[in-house]
Image (cartoon, helix red, strand yellow):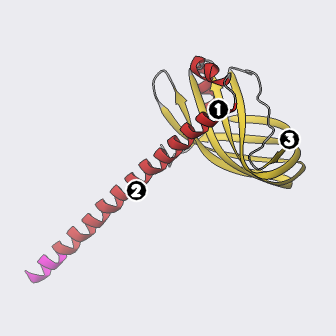
Amino acid sequence: MKRTLSALCIVLLVASAASFAHEKHKRTLEDKQAGIDQMAENTLKRLFQASAAIEPQFEAAMGYAVFHNTKVAMGITGGGGVGVAVNKETGERTYMKMGTAGIGFSLGAQIYDVIFLFQDPGALQHFIQSGWEGETQANLAAGTMGANAATSFIKGKRVYHLTDSGVMASADVTGSKYWVSKKLN
């Protein structure tokens, strides 16, 4: 009887610990998603402050994606980050990751945000499903004074870069891959 009671207590203790660990993981996931959502909101506010002409474009877009990235370069470029793609019509949020690699005449480190505006649901869905972006860049960024120009709509999307911090002098060709994060969704 005493042995059965001890075994029952151990089983209940293990079950409680597993339940607590699951709840902690659930809260952690929600906290991560909330952090990404807050980053996206703050980045959009900074973008609108940088150029008042962008806000009407955002309002007309059916969706958007915002990513926070870190890039390091010494001839070879590498970096990564996280973000969220949002369908404004449905409110659906897809949490994503990104990685970038390239080669060129580059030296330094930079923290920056990338904002995509999507004209239609097909452009947003294509981005979420395939996510490849090719870039050819020539820029000089120092601190928060990044000189990165926006592109026009290409294949249903418009892209903006905002520099957070760092020093980067580069002329490189990079490829960036954006993909759905299984751990964040």
Q: Are marks 1 and 2 in contact (CB under 8 Å)?
A: no
Q: Residue furthest right?
A: 105
Few, some or many C-alpha atoms within 10 Å of disc 2 (few <14, some 14-19, many ≥20)?
A: few
Q: Secondary structure at mark 3?
A: strand
Tell me the residue that label 3 is attached to: 139
Image: magenta residue range: 1-7
Q: x and y percent of residue 76 in the render?
A: 85, 53
Q: Quadrant of the N terminus?
A: bottom left
Report the residue at 72% width, 21% height from top: 155
Q: Residue furthest bottom?
A: 2
Q: Are marks 3 and 2 in contact (CB under 8 Å)?
A: no
Taking depth in this image into account, of 155 and 105 the one nearest to the observer is 105
Tell me the residue that label 1 is attached to: 49
Taking depth in this image into account, of 71 and 101 the one nearest to the observer is 71
Tag 2 or tag 1, which sits nearer the N-term? 2
Residue 178 part of the magenta-drawn span? no
* Disc sitting over residue 25 in the figure: 2
Q: Main secondary structure of the magenta part?
A: helix
Q: How many marks?
A: 3
Few, some or many C-alpha atoms within 10 Å of disc 3 (few <14, some 14-19, many ≥20)?
A: some
